[in-house]
Amino acid sequence: MNLSWYALNRQELPDVLLGELKLSSRPMSDPYPTDSDVVLGISNAERGSEPIVAVALVGATGKELFSWISTYAEEIFPLTQFCRVCSIEDWKQLQLQTHNESMIGAVSSIWPSVVLGEMLGQADADTNVAGIPLARAAACFSFAIARTILLYPSHEIALNRCTERMAMVERDSRFGQRLITVESLKKVCSVALPLQDVLDESLNIVDIVLQIVAAIDKQAADFLVANNSLLSDSAEDRVEGFDSVVDTLFEKLNSNAIKRDVCTVTLAAAAILAGRGTSHIQLLATVAKRFPETLVWYGLLAGVLGPRGWDKAWRQQTKSIERSLRQFFRPDEPVSADICWSEYEWLSKTYNSMEVLNAIPKSAPRSLAIELLPGVSCQFRFAGQGSNAKTIDDHQATEMKGKIEVPVITESVLLQAVDLLADVQKLLLPHGLPRGHRQLSLFEGDSPTKPSPSSRRKSKDKL
């Protein structure tokens, strides 16, 4: 990565980005010691080719810069259209100036498996692994967490900032609520981090699952060990054992004898043990609708087992997710997200309307992709426009069912309606019309009144 740094005032920025102004100042050795509004990193400046603006670093005056752009230079907002936008603080603390890795190496099987579990859980506990669209991976919190860990393995501050920023967007009412929250995923990832480097395939599946569950929660492990059917060699007995675990857990939940976290870990492990891998995920179809985070724990345990415990559908999906996690990254490369974090942070603190977010050029019309950290993006769907929003509305409708009072039609109301109809009928009948205003016949030649006796006799004579 070869960047030349130029400090600019805000008035110069539009012309430089639009190619109407040549940089006349001398480049700086590094972007840090400056009081300018923005520092641009220009690539290819020494090769004689046309220079390209690769990075825009904003400092403490970033708020004033974005406010000025939105007022006087709307055509260049967001700056992400032209280059990567990053705070000087992030650039310095994440050591992006000396970032050399362009390709992520081997990825632990835990991370794509956890992402797949969240994909299923966020989709209203869908257990159709083969049918889940891979595009949903980019919208998963765990995907952003995994990318952060893979890109910045030696920077704990990066993981903290990623989760804090996702939680901030999660609280933004302009985006749809999710069934699995950032907070619940932090617990799963705190377990996944130490496990990614200590995988041991010498142990059998039962021993691995029981040891991991015991490390997570001893009470959950006790439930599993006490169920002899779940540990049986018979597949039918193991399914019966799973049903027994479900009955026991729900009974204790109703009496507040156990916590929700214990229940979700136990259910996930029981489903893994019942199928001795990922083949029996359908057992969670019903319980995961009540506890969607169960599928994330299921993904964690499946990831620890690795490919030997995966069926065909799980293996295919995790390998595709792994490919996405290993995407190429260089700080001076174009951004695939719609907007960078510094820009979203300013927008969220300045405007509350949905129209501001809708006005941003987006890759998808109903969602916004935000780059939380350089190379780490997450897609957020606008409120009321996604499947999760519909699911939440359905849950609310179910809760309200029976609470809405339906007006009762009483006998007195019916009698009043009958009387009203009778009055209308009298007005429409011929004898109810004034003299000289008899109703005409519908057909030509028909008489509206009955023929007289003499006319009837004359007609008979003619015949």
Image (cartoon, grey):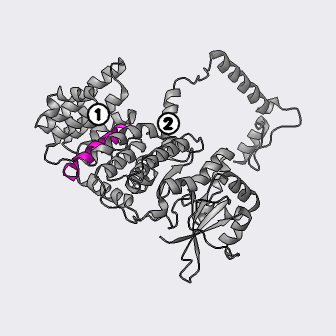
Kindly identify the residue that appears in the image at 76 percent across and 50 percent down: 444
* Segment colored magenta: 292-310
Above or below — where is 397 with respect to 123? above
Amino acid type at circle 1 is Ile
> Which mark, residue 394?
2
Single out the residue that lies furthest toward the bottom: 48
| Residue 454 drawn at (x, y percent) | 79, 37
Kindly identify the residue that appears in the image at 60 percent across and 65 percent down: 81
Q: Is residue 372 visible?
A: no
Dot 2 alpha-carbon crowd within 10 angstroms: few under 14, some 14 to 19, many 20 or more: few
Single out the residue that lies furthest toward the left: 233
Observer-nearest residue: 272 or 67? 67
Query: Count the marks: how many?
Result: 2
Amino acid type at circle 2 is Asp
Q: Nearer the viewer, mark 1 or mark 2?
A: 1
Distance (Cα) linking label 1 and label 2: 33 Å
Where disc 1 sits, the SS reads helix
| Residue 461 drawn at (x, y percent) | 73, 44
Observer-nearest residue: 40 or 340? 40
- Judging by the rendered image, the residue that carries numbered circle 1 is 216
| Residue 3 drawn at (x, y percent) | 53, 70
First in residue order: circle 1 vs circle 2: 1
Q: Is residue 45 visible?
A: yes
Query: Disc 1, disc 2: CB below 8 Å?
Result: no
